Image (cartoon, grey):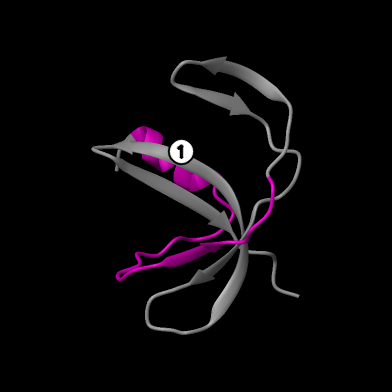
Amino acid sequence: MATEDKDVAERRRDFRQSLAGTVTVRLQAQDIVGPGENVSPDGVFFVAEAALPVEVILPGTSEVRQGELVRVTQMGAGRVGVAIRFPPAP
């Protein structure tokens, strides 16, 4: 494991395990509003002032879990990585 990867793993609050199969994420219809940061002919960047709620179905189950979209990262070759946070268990 590279040093950078090890440092990230040590900062994480919870253990991650590999996940095989397809994850389904449903974006709940709502307006996303926030102050603009910058704009160019290629796009716009702004900061949302609210949580972005989603529904998630993990592989091997039909259970719908509530979550919050927290990050989208360009992965290259037309792919994006999507990070969703689940609320803490009661």
Amino acid residing under circle 1: Asp
Q: Where is residue 77 in the image (x, y as percent from the top left)?
A: 23, 38
**With 62 as the anchor, is 89 left or right in this view?**
right
Query: Which residue sits at x=69%, y=37%?
Result: 48
Q: Look at 35% across and 64% down and name the residue there.
A: 18
> Residue at (39%, 33%) from the top-left corner?
4
User: Compared with residue 7, is residue 58 higher up or lower down, i.e. above or below?
Assistant: below
Q: In this view, does 90 lie to the left or right of 57?
A: right
Instruction: Judge by depth and name the residue closer to the eye, 33 or 48.
Output: 33
Residue 7 vs residue 69: left or right?
left
In which quadrant of the rendered image does the N terminus lie?
A: top left
Quadrant where the C terminus sits is: bottom right
User: Depth check: 88 or 72 in front?
Assistant: 72
Q: How crowded is mark 1: few (under 14 residues within 10 Å), some or many (20 or more)?
A: few
- Asked if the magenta segment contains residue 18, the reply would be yes
Up the image or down, 31 lies above or below 87; here it is above
Q: Give the range drawn in magenta.
A: 3-31
Residue at left offset 28%, top offset 40%: 78
Q: Name the residue under label 1.
A: 7
